[in-house]
Image (tube, helix red, strand yellow):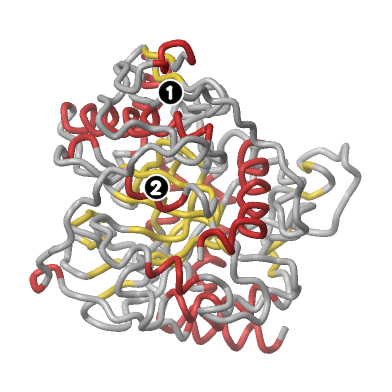
Amino acid sequence: MARFWKLAAAAAMVAVSSVEAISQISVKGSKFFTDDGNQFFIKGMFSCTFHLLQRHLTHRLLVGVAYQLTEDDPLIDTNQCQLDASLMQKLGANTIRVYHVDPTGDHKGCMDAFADAGIYLFVDLDTFDTAIEQESPRWNTSQLNAFEQVLDEFQKYDNTAGVLVGNEVLTTGNGSVAAPYVKAAARDVKAYRDSKNYRNIPVGYSAADIASLRPMLQNYLACGTNSSEALDFFSLNAYEWCGSSSYTVSGYSQLTANVTKYNIPIFFSETGCNTNPPRTFQDQSAIFGDDMSPYWSGAIVYEWIEETNNYGLVNYGPKVAATATGAIDGFPRSGTPTPVSPDFSNLMSQWATATPSGTKLSDYTPTNQPPACPASTSGIWEVDPSSPLPTLGQTYKAAAATSSSGASGTSKQSPTGTTSSTSPTATKKGSAASGGKEVAGMTVGLAAVMFCFVWWL
């Protein structure tokens, strides 16, 4: 613990702790920038993030954590957010990702607490009953209205860094027919944002790391000459770097080789393999190093709270009975967060030394062009690049896909794939608060990493 507090004290010396207004985040080309003209790199956590004082005049790190203490909405308990934000700040995070929120809740206390700690939010717009599904994709008014309600609520806050229209919707080749519906959702959310004269909050998507889908999906969601129909950013849930690996052995070198010409920002929306504990987070030095930082905009580590999946960076006390009040599966959900050793200190050490080379907004002229829309390939990528996006109210029907240029925006095959797969040991098993969809999606993603890596190379 002495080592932890020494690191915490060092981080606190450089952490931003004032209550000055936080800079807004926007996109230009393939990079995020703050409104004071500095490039922004994500250092974050699932449903919770942390912030480091900018180390150079040209960049601010984007490092974060996944933060979902409760299934419905972790951003309504001001006192808990204040406790967590304080420790996240010591960790060095500047971003959190939250998967599910209640747009009718009062989020001001939590959003202010995170803003005061220099922490930004990426929030998913879907709920458990409005998400786009690959088995029978649809995009309708009810879904759009629900997405709009979340945007209405979180556009109020300067530390809302971006919103996501989907998480791991596609996990199979046949499920690729859902891609046009994801893109249609982004189109309509962006149109609504602009119609309301909101600031240009970036709209993006979080993809499962499926080797056979990844290159087509990331290009499809950014392709086309009409920028109003393309994503503002793309992110990847990747768990390829496990234990003492390397830039090449992990596959990060190949991931990077396929994004050097990408025209929108890309970052890791989940990372942090735990198959070889304790986690040392060596991948962070690669992500923020010279090989990757010119192309990647940071990483969000999975996850803040310790659960049965053993991905947590903190806990809220000893495990209790599964039926205990305030606990899920025996894990308390509130109180003073206690670092999980040595994972917390290991991540703190990695982020404390992360110094990516950034660029000033005034010195940056984007040159990358939108990628070509990928061609349809049966069983691998079943989307006709020439077809229009689905209209609002449209549902994919297999019979309508018999014409390769049908209104569904897909090719001839029907979506028959499911999200079931043999689970490698690194899956997020038992993440009750995060929701089953995130767990199932990552299970498939990790399986694909194991079995499709050779195909990708």
Between 236 and 176, the residue placed more toward the observer is 176
Between 227 and 358, the residue placed more toward the observer is 227
Query: Residue type at mark 1?
Result: Lys
Q: Residues under labels 1 and 2: Cα distance?
A: 17 Å
Q: Is residue 34 above or below residue 357?
A: above
Residue 216: numbered disc? 2
Q: Can residue 15 be seen at all in this image of the molecule?
A: yes
Circle 1 crowding by C-alpha within 10 Å: few under 14, some 14–19, many from 20: many
Residue 186 point in image, percent of width and height = 31, 34
Between 277 and 242, the residue placed more toward the observer is 242
Which element is circle 2 on? helix
Residue 271 as seen in the image, left or right of residue 110? right
Query: Residue type at mark 2?
Result: Met
Residue 89 point in image, percent of width and height = 49, 69
Instruction: Look at 45% across and 29% down and name the residue there.
Output: 177
Residue 412: numbered disc? 1
Total tally of numbered discs in the picture = 2
